[in-house]
Amino acid sequence: MQHLLAETDFSPAQLPELFALAATFKKNRGGHVPPVLSGQTWALIFTKSSTRTRVSFEVGIRELGGHALFLSKNDIQLGRGESIADTARVLSRYLHGLIVRTFDHADVETLAREGSIPVINALTDFLHPCQIFADAFSLSERWAGTDGDPLAALRGRTVAFFGDCACNVANSWILGAGLLGMKLRLAGPEAFAPGPEIAELAARAASLGGGSFSFTTDPEAAAEGADVLYTDVWVSMGREEESAERIEQMRPYAVTGSLMARTKPDALFMHCLPAYPGKEVEASVLAGPQSIVFDQAENRLHMQKAILAVLGQGGLRRGRG
Ligand code: CP
Protein backbone atom coordinates (compact mmCIF):
# COMPACT_ATOMS: atom_id res chain seq x y z
CA MET A 1 0.00 0.00 0.00
CA GLN A 2 1.56 3.28 -1.06
CA HIS A 3 0.74 6.45 0.91
CA LEU A 4 1.92 10.04 0.54
CA LEU A 5 2.68 11.23 4.06
CA ALA A 6 6.13 12.66 3.26
CA GLU A 7 7.98 13.32 -0.01
CA THR A 8 10.25 10.37 0.82
CA ASP A 9 7.30 8.01 0.29
CA PHE A 10 8.27 8.38 -3.38
CA SER A 11 11.73 7.46 -4.61
CA PRO A 12 13.54 9.53 -7.27
CA ALA A 13 12.92 6.62 -9.68
CA GLN A 14 9.15 7.09 -9.31
CA LEU A 15 9.11 10.84 -9.87
CA PRO A 16 9.41 10.90 -13.71
CA GLU A 17 6.17 8.88 -13.93
CA LEU A 18 4.43 11.21 -11.46
CA PHE A 19 5.54 14.36 -13.30
CA ALA A 20 4.64 12.88 -16.71
CA LEU A 21 1.15 12.03 -15.48
CA ALA A 22 0.65 15.56 -14.12
CA ALA A 23 1.76 17.00 -17.48
CA THR A 24 -0.65 14.72 -19.34
CA PHE A 25 -3.56 15.66 -17.08
CA LYS A 26 -2.75 19.35 -17.56
CA LYS A 27 -2.50 19.05 -21.35
CA ASN A 28 -5.69 17.00 -21.67
CA ARG A 29 -7.87 18.94 -19.24
CA GLY A 30 -11.29 19.37 -20.78
CA GLY A 31 -10.67 16.47 -23.17
CA HIS A 32 -10.85 12.76 -22.50
CA VAL A 33 -9.35 11.72 -19.18
CA PRO A 34 -9.27 8.00 -18.31
CA PRO A 35 -11.70 7.52 -15.38
CA VAL A 36 -9.04 5.91 -13.22
CA LEU A 37 -11.03 6.50 -10.02
CA SER A 38 -14.30 5.17 -11.45
CA GLY A 39 -16.31 3.51 -8.69
CA GLN A 40 -14.03 4.93 -5.98
CA THR A 41 -14.98 7.23 -3.10
CA TRP A 42 -12.23 9.27 -1.41
CA ALA A 43 -12.89 11.24 1.77
CA LEU A 44 -11.25 14.52 2.69
CA ILE A 45 -10.93 14.84 6.48
CA PHE A 46 -9.91 18.43 7.21
CA THR A 47 -9.47 19.93 10.67
CA LYS A 48 -7.97 23.16 9.24
CA SER A 49 -9.21 25.64 6.63
CA SER A 50 -8.24 25.30 2.98
CA THR A 51 -9.00 26.91 -0.36
CA ARG A 52 -6.51 25.40 -2.84
CA THR A 53 -6.02 21.94 -1.36
CA ARG A 54 -9.67 21.17 -0.69
CA VAL A 55 -11.04 22.50 -3.98
CA SER A 56 -8.29 21.03 -6.17
CA PHE A 57 -8.66 17.59 -4.58
CA GLU A 58 -12.46 17.61 -4.88
CA VAL A 59 -12.33 18.75 -8.51
CA GLY A 60 -9.50 16.32 -9.29
CA ILE A 61 -11.36 13.31 -7.87
CA ARG A 62 -14.45 14.18 -9.89
CA GLU A 63 -12.44 14.69 -13.08
CA LEU A 64 -10.93 11.22 -12.60
CA GLY A 65 -14.38 9.66 -12.36
CA GLY A 66 -14.46 9.22 -8.57
CA HIS A 67 -16.62 10.61 -5.78
CA ALA A 68 -15.32 13.06 -3.15
CA LEU A 69 -16.73 13.20 0.38
CA PHE A 70 -15.73 16.19 2.53
CA LEU A 71 -15.75 15.57 6.29
CA SER A 72 -14.85 18.23 8.78
CA LYS A 73 -13.72 16.92 12.18
CA ASN A 74 -17.14 17.69 13.65
CA ASP A 75 -19.01 15.76 10.95
CA ILE A 76 -17.64 12.48 12.31
CA GLN A 77 -17.09 10.98 15.77
CA LEU A 78 -13.40 11.92 15.67
CA GLY A 79 -14.53 15.32 16.95
CA ARG A 80 -16.10 13.59 19.98
CA GLY A 81 -13.03 11.58 20.84
CA GLU A 82 -13.34 8.35 18.81
CA SER A 83 -9.80 7.08 18.34
CA ILE A 84 -7.89 7.74 15.15
CA ALA A 85 -7.08 4.04 14.89
CA ASP A 86 -10.76 3.00 15.03
CA THR A 87 -11.65 5.76 12.57
CA ALA A 88 -9.02 4.38 10.17
CA ARG A 89 -10.31 0.81 10.52
CA VAL A 90 -13.96 1.80 9.99
CA LEU A 91 -13.39 4.20 7.09
CA SER A 92 -11.24 1.57 5.35
CA ARG A 93 -14.39 -0.60 5.09
CA TYR A 94 -16.24 2.08 3.09
CA LEU A 95 -13.71 4.18 1.18
CA HIS A 96 -10.90 3.81 -1.34
CA GLY A 97 -8.65 6.54 0.06
CA LEU A 98 -8.26 9.31 2.63
CA ILE A 99 -6.95 12.85 2.15
CA VAL A 100 -6.17 14.40 5.51
CA ARG A 101 -5.34 17.94 6.67
CA THR A 102 -4.65 18.18 10.37
CA PHE A 103 -2.27 19.50 13.03
CA ASP A 104 -0.31 16.51 14.36
CA HIS A 105 1.67 14.57 11.76
CA ALA A 106 1.44 11.47 13.96
CA ASP A 107 -2.31 11.40 13.21
CA VAL A 108 -1.80 10.83 9.47
CA GLU A 109 0.80 8.16 10.29
CA THR A 110 -1.74 6.40 12.55
CA LEU A 111 -4.44 6.56 9.86
CA ALA A 112 -2.03 5.02 7.35
CA ARG A 113 -0.78 2.35 9.76
CA GLU A 114 -4.16 1.28 11.19
CA GLY A 115 -6.24 1.54 8.01
CA SER A 116 -6.03 -0.46 4.79
CA ILE A 117 -6.50 2.30 2.19
CA PRO A 118 -4.08 4.93 0.82
CA VAL A 119 -3.65 8.11 2.89
CA ILE A 120 -2.54 11.43 1.40
CA ASN A 121 -1.13 14.15 3.65
CA ALA A 122 -2.93 17.35 2.64
CA LEU A 123 -0.87 19.33 5.22
CA THR A 124 0.16 18.72 8.78
CA ASP A 125 2.14 21.02 11.07
CA PHE A 126 5.22 19.04 9.96
CA LEU A 127 4.92 18.58 6.19
CA HIS A 128 3.00 19.65 3.06
CA PRO A 129 4.18 17.21 0.36
CA CYS A 130 1.40 17.87 -2.20
CA GLN A 131 2.47 21.53 -2.27
CA ILE A 132 6.13 20.79 -2.92
CA PHE A 133 5.49 18.23 -5.68
CA ALA A 134 3.22 20.79 -7.41
CA ASP A 135 5.87 23.50 -6.90
CA ALA A 136 8.60 21.33 -8.40
CA PHE A 137 6.31 20.52 -11.33
CA SER A 138 5.73 24.28 -11.83
CA LEU A 139 9.49 24.86 -11.99
CA SER A 140 10.08 21.91 -14.29
CA GLU A 141 7.54 23.15 -16.84
CA ARG A 142 9.25 26.57 -16.83
CA TRP A 143 12.76 25.21 -17.16
CA ALA A 144 12.30 22.05 -19.26
CA GLY A 145 9.49 23.24 -21.53
CA THR A 146 7.37 20.54 -23.16
CA ASP A 147 10.19 18.45 -24.68
CA GLY A 148 12.95 18.55 -22.05
CA ASP A 149 13.53 16.17 -19.15
CA PRO A 150 11.54 17.73 -16.28
CA LEU A 151 13.61 16.18 -13.52
CA ALA A 152 16.97 16.97 -15.15
CA ALA A 153 15.86 20.61 -15.45
CA LEU A 154 15.58 20.85 -11.66
CA ARG A 155 18.87 19.20 -10.71
CA GLY A 156 21.50 21.60 -9.35
CA ARG A 157 19.12 24.60 -9.24
CA THR A 158 19.00 26.83 -6.14
CA VAL A 159 15.81 27.68 -4.23
CA ALA A 160 16.07 30.25 -1.43
CA PHE A 161 13.30 30.10 1.20
CA PHE A 162 12.66 33.03 3.58
CA GLY A 163 10.88 33.25 6.92
CA ASP A 164 9.94 30.40 9.25
CA CYS A 165 12.47 27.73 8.25
CA ALA A 166 10.94 25.16 10.61
CA CYS A 167 7.41 25.38 9.15
CA ASN A 168 5.73 22.59 7.18
CA VAL A 169 6.46 24.11 3.75
CA ALA A 170 10.14 24.66 4.63
CA ASN A 171 10.40 21.09 5.96
CA SER A 172 8.79 19.75 2.81
CA TRP A 173 11.16 21.81 0.65
CA ILE A 174 14.08 20.27 2.56
CA LEU A 175 12.80 16.82 1.55
CA GLY A 176 11.86 17.90 -1.98
CA ALA A 177 15.24 19.49 -2.65
CA GLY A 178 17.00 16.39 -1.31
CA LEU A 179 15.00 14.02 -3.53
CA LEU A 180 15.19 16.22 -6.64
CA GLY A 181 18.92 17.00 -6.41
CA MET A 182 18.30 20.71 -5.78
CA LYS A 183 20.12 23.14 -3.49
CA LEU A 184 17.92 24.75 -0.84
CA ARG A 185 19.03 27.81 1.12
CA LEU A 186 16.84 28.63 4.12
CA ALA A 187 17.04 32.14 5.59
CA GLY A 188 15.30 33.21 8.78
CA PRO A 189 15.76 34.18 12.43
CA GLU A 190 17.94 31.78 14.44
CA ALA A 191 14.88 30.81 16.52
CA PHE A 192 13.18 29.57 13.32
CA ALA A 193 16.03 27.41 11.98
CA PRO A 194 15.14 23.88 10.80
CA GLY A 195 14.47 21.66 13.81
CA PRO A 196 16.01 18.29 14.71
CA GLU A 197 12.74 16.50 13.86
CA ILE A 198 13.41 16.87 10.11
CA ALA A 199 17.03 15.63 10.25
CA GLU A 200 16.43 11.90 9.71
CA LEU A 201 14.04 12.32 6.76
CA ALA A 202 16.27 15.07 5.30
CA ALA A 203 19.28 12.74 5.36
CA ARG A 204 17.22 10.02 3.69
CA ALA A 205 15.98 12.39 0.95
CA ALA A 206 19.50 13.69 0.30
CA SER A 207 20.93 10.17 0.11
CA LEU A 208 18.23 9.18 -2.41
CA GLY A 209 18.37 12.24 -4.66
CA GLY A 210 21.65 14.03 -3.98
CA GLY A 211 20.18 17.42 -3.03
CA SER A 212 21.20 19.55 -0.06
CA PHE A 213 20.08 22.34 2.25
CA SER A 214 21.73 25.04 4.34
CA PHE A 215 20.51 27.63 6.86
CA THR A 216 21.58 31.26 7.29
CA THR A 217 20.32 34.31 9.16
CA ASP A 218 21.54 36.52 6.26
CA PRO A 219 18.70 37.04 3.71
CA GLU A 220 20.93 38.78 1.15
CA ALA A 221 23.45 35.93 1.14
CA ALA A 222 20.60 33.44 0.62
CA ALA A 223 19.21 35.38 -2.37
CA GLU A 224 22.57 35.87 -4.11
CA GLY A 225 22.47 34.16 -7.53
CA ALA A 226 19.43 32.02 -6.62
CA ASP A 227 17.07 30.58 -9.26
CA VAL A 228 13.98 30.95 -7.06
CA LEU A 229 12.96 33.05 -4.05
CA TYR A 230 10.18 31.37 -2.07
CA THR A 231 8.24 32.46 0.99
CA ASP A 232 5.21 31.47 3.04
CA VAL A 233 2.95 33.24 5.53
CA TRP A 234 4.71 34.25 8.73
CA VAL A 235 1.82 33.19 10.96
CA SER A 236 0.72 29.62 10.24
CA MET A 237 -2.72 28.25 11.03
CA GLY A 238 -2.96 27.61 14.76
CA ARG A 239 -0.19 30.06 15.73
CA GLU A 240 -2.24 33.27 15.60
CA GLU A 241 -1.65 34.06 19.29
CA GLU A 242 2.11 34.43 18.62
CA SER A 243 1.62 36.73 15.63
CA ALA A 244 2.96 40.14 16.82
CA GLU A 245 6.27 38.72 18.06
CA ARG A 246 6.72 36.48 15.01
CA ILE A 247 6.08 39.34 12.59
CA GLU A 248 8.76 41.48 14.27
CA GLN A 249 11.31 38.67 14.06
CA MET A 250 10.45 37.85 10.43
CA ARG A 251 10.44 41.41 9.08
CA PRO A 252 14.09 41.34 7.80
CA TYR A 253 13.21 38.25 5.75
CA ALA A 254 10.42 39.81 3.63
CA VAL A 255 10.92 39.18 -0.09
CA THR A 256 11.39 42.64 -1.57
CA GLY A 257 12.39 44.03 -4.95
CA SER A 258 15.92 44.62 -3.67
CA LEU A 259 16.19 40.97 -2.58
CA MET A 260 14.93 39.86 -6.02
CA ALA A 261 17.64 42.05 -7.60
CA ARG A 262 20.32 39.79 -6.06
CA THR A 263 19.06 36.66 -7.85
CA LYS A 264 19.78 35.41 -11.37
CA PRO A 265 18.13 37.76 -13.90
CA ASP A 266 15.52 35.15 -14.89
CA ALA A 267 14.81 34.01 -11.32
CA LEU A 268 11.25 33.20 -10.26
CA PHE A 269 9.22 34.18 -7.21
CA MET A 270 7.08 31.50 -5.55
CA HIS A 271 4.57 31.48 -2.69
CA CYS A 272 2.27 28.62 -1.72
CA LEU A 273 -0.55 31.10 -0.88
CA PRO A 274 -2.51 32.54 0.82
CA ALA A 275 -0.22 35.61 0.68
CA TYR A 276 -0.21 38.75 2.78
CA PRO A 277 1.39 41.46 0.59
CA GLY A 278 3.28 44.01 2.65
CA LYS A 279 4.26 41.34 5.16
CA GLU A 280 6.23 38.31 3.89
CA VAL A 281 6.35 39.69 0.32
CA GLU A 282 6.27 43.12 -1.27
CA ALA A 283 3.09 43.59 -3.35
CA SER A 284 5.13 44.48 -6.47
CA VAL A 285 7.05 41.18 -6.25
CA LEU A 286 3.91 39.10 -5.66
CA ALA A 287 2.18 40.65 -8.70
CA GLY A 288 5.38 41.12 -10.73
CA PRO A 289 6.55 39.39 -13.94
CA GLN A 290 8.79 36.91 -12.09
CA SER A 291 5.95 35.66 -9.89
CA ILE A 292 4.47 32.23 -10.75
CA VAL A 293 2.18 31.94 -7.73
CA PHE A 294 -0.99 31.24 -9.73
CA ASP A 295 0.76 28.59 -11.84
CA GLN A 296 1.70 26.94 -8.55
CA ALA A 297 -1.93 27.11 -7.40
CA GLU A 298 -3.23 25.68 -10.70
CA ASN A 299 -0.65 22.90 -10.70
CA ARG A 300 -1.92 21.66 -7.34
CA LEU A 301 -4.86 20.25 -9.35
CA HIS A 302 -2.75 18.51 -12.03
CA MET A 303 -0.15 17.08 -9.63
CA GLN A 304 -2.78 15.88 -7.14
CA LYS A 305 -4.65 14.13 -9.97
CA ALA A 306 -1.37 12.35 -10.75
CA ILE A 307 -0.95 11.38 -7.07
CA LEU A 308 -4.57 10.17 -6.89
CA ALA A 309 -4.22 8.19 -10.11
CA VAL A 310 -1.16 6.28 -8.91
CA LEU A 311 -2.31 5.70 -5.33
CA GLY A 312 -5.84 4.85 -6.49
CA GLN A 313 -4.41 2.15 -8.76
CA GLY A 314 -2.19 0.56 -6.14
CA GLY A 315 0.95 2.68 -6.33
CA LEU A 316 3.66 3.38 -8.85
CA ARG A 317 5.29 0.64 -10.89
CA ARG A 318 8.94 1.40 -10.13
CA GLY A 319 10.80 0.54 -6.93
CA ARG A 320 9.58 2.42 -3.91
CA GLY A 321 11.67 4.68 -1.69
N1 CP B 1 -1.22 26.34 -0.21
C1 CP B 1 -2.28 25.74 0.38
O1 CP B 1 -2.18 24.61 0.88
O2 CP B 1 -3.43 26.45 0.30
P1 CP B 1 -4.75 26.13 1.14
O3 CP B 1 -4.42 26.29 2.60
O4 CP B 1 -5.76 27.16 0.66
O5 CP B 1 -5.18 24.75 0.83
Image (cartoon, rainbow, N blue to C red):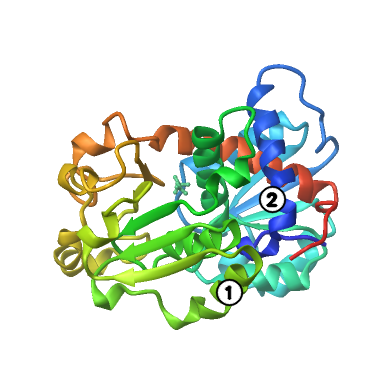
- Pick the front one: 205 or 127: 205
Q: Residue furthest top?
A: 31
Dot 2 falls on a residue whose secondary structure is: helix
Question: Who is closer to the viewer here, 192 or 144?
Answer: 144
Give me the residue at 61% from left, 61% from top: 7
Q: Earlier in the sequence, mark 2 or mark 1?
A: 2
On the image, the x and y values in percent for residue 207 come to: 62, 72
- Helix, strand or loop at disc 1? helix
Inspect the image, locate mark 1, and give the three-letter code of the amino acid beneath it.
Leu
Where is 139 relative to 198, above or below? above
* Residue in view at x 70 percent, y 41 percent: 306
Numbered disc total: 2
Which residue is the site of mark 2? 15
Crowding near the residue tagged with mark 2, few <14, some 14–19, many ≥20 C-alpha atoms within 10 Å: some
Q: Quadrant of residue 55?
A: top right
Name the side, left or right, on which 99 lies relative to 286: right
Residue 206 vs 16, above or below: the answer is below
